[in-house]
Amino acid sequence: MTKTQFIAAAGGNTPVDLLLTNARIVNVFSGEMLPGNIAIAGCHIVGIGDYAAKQVVDLKGKIVAPGFIDPHLHIESAMVSVSEFARAVLARGTTTVVADPHEIANVLGIAGIRYMLDAAEGQPVNVYYTLPSCVPATELETAGARLAAGDLSPLMAHERILALAEMMNFPGVIHRDSAVLEKIEIAETHGKKVDGHAPGLSGKALNAYIGAGIASDHECTSALEARDKLRAGMHIMIREGTGAKNLFDILPLVNAGDCHRMMWCTDDRHPQDLLEKGHVDDLIRRAIQAGLDPVTAIRMGTLNPAEYFGLSHSGAIGPGRRADLVVLSDLSNLKIESVYSGGILSVENGYVLPGILFPTLPPPPPAMNVGISKPDFSIPLAGTDIRVIQIIPDQIVTTAAFVPVSVKENRAVADTRRDLLKIAVVERHKATGNVGVGFVRGMGLKRGAIGASVAHDSHNIILVGENDTDMNTVLARIIEMGGGLAVACEGQILCELPLPVAGLMSGEPLAVVRNKLDELTLAARSLGAVLSDPFMTLSFLALPVIPDLKITDLGLVDVASFKIVPLFQNHPDSAFLPWEIGRNDDQAPCRR
């Protein structure tokens, strides 16, 4: 539609294509709920009022909100194609997403980003991207690609690129790393935002980070942290994903004075949560049920992210805005009756209508280049106590514990009596043969092993197990599948999910992937796993930019110091004794 045609329709000089009458409109500009008719011509809203129309739909007093917007997520975490992801979230009222293709970029580089850009074309959901800033995320791991400012620059002007993606290398910013600052300058030159990622950063370090041009943060885990970052000028994205759940910790901070600088995001959501709980609608619903004003909650999922990214045509119901609309019958439960995408009725009663098309691309070439087929995961004894990654349920942060080493035949071994399991990361991109080995607590396995080629951010193969044989069984199957998830026990694969698209995504429908993930979770639990989503937690144990202790193909990473640290700790004043496997529990080591 030309501007002349739009003005004619908006002025009532020509009939509009569609008039939605008797609506209760969520006005996110004024914070009100107002009665009215919504006039649509082409894919845009031309006005609110009485218009002559080719088609009239009586909404009979139902509530109409702007289509929901997710300002930060990784489509790859849904483990399906862009088209399947779009189909799933459109049914839940999401009409715009701003995705960071950081995961596939760490595997395939620029080719992966271009694949995601191409896959966005023609989707009924507006799929935008931020340009990955940290490939690799750190120098403490081996990624499949390395993207410098010069590699990113040609893509920054792309119409689907809205920002430089989460700047995870906050030490690089603070210490004025020229390569890091050059990426920020490229974004600023193109008038694009720079998203942040700075868990726990405060004080002068936070000042330096924000002063470099970082505009947002989605890593806050407490209201106190979010408050400090808000006061310093950041926009806060309140995250509620599958692995990290921060909504209820930060929600008490939301008030009339700061809500315009806050928004919801999902970051990483597995298929189970997308299908069973929802997407942005889930966050809005939870916030409303927790007592937040409904219009404010909807504004944080619509207008706020639109304004942050400069999407002046989205995020609200008004003249010139895209006709992305969610029709609700119940505001307190956010019950979605139908969804309009660009003025086209696309969803009714929770189901995408048959005529709505989701273009699909063929997958890129396989991305699996492991240099060692059967690594030796054994750990020679080299001390009395060891560093252990301590999982925190429903969080992607971990803590570091120091515990007595369990010993068998002069080797450090897993010990299920203490929930002490072996963890390993095997490099899969450049055939280096790198293997990082350590220990983890909190997974709960009593037997067998689990593993995945989804391991943020470099996506090497990560394994956790009670014994080396099953860990190697899982590894071999993941390699054979060209990437994926697997569970093994006594040398046999119990369950698997192939992920042939960069070892990250399946070509199957979301429901199929969800069902297989359910089977994998049940298989892991049959071996003793205690976490609600063991594979989501597993995928973040290799992320060396999230505190406190993580593991990569190069070894254990102390995130605070950004250094590889030894597994064994032999302090002169050590209060620990080795725990020899086979001794009675009453002979367990204790403090002297």
Image (cartoon, rainbow, N blue to C red):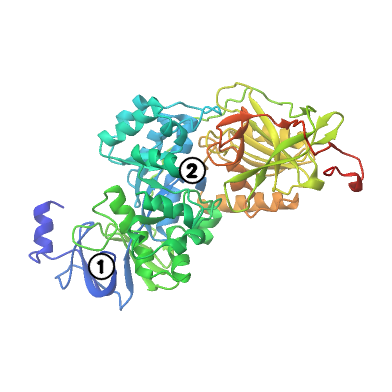
Q: Is residue 472 visible?
A: yes
Residue that lies at the very extreme toward the front in this rendered image: 573
Q: Is residue 311 above or below residue 162?
A: below
Instruction: Name the amino acid, label 1.
Output: Ser
**Residue 508 locus on image (x, y percent):** 52, 46
Q: Dot 2: what SS? A: helix
Q: Position of residue 342 (x, y in %)?
A: 28, 57
240 and 154: which is toward the camera: 240
Which quadrant holds residue 183? top left
Left or right of 234? Residue 522 is right
Quadrant placement of the C terminus:
top right
Q: Is residue 282 visible?
A: no
Labels 1 & 2 near each other (Cβ < 8 A)? no
Instruction: Select label 1 or label 2 by which is in front.
Output: 1
Q: Which residue is mark 1?
A: 30
Numbered circle sitting on residue 76: 2
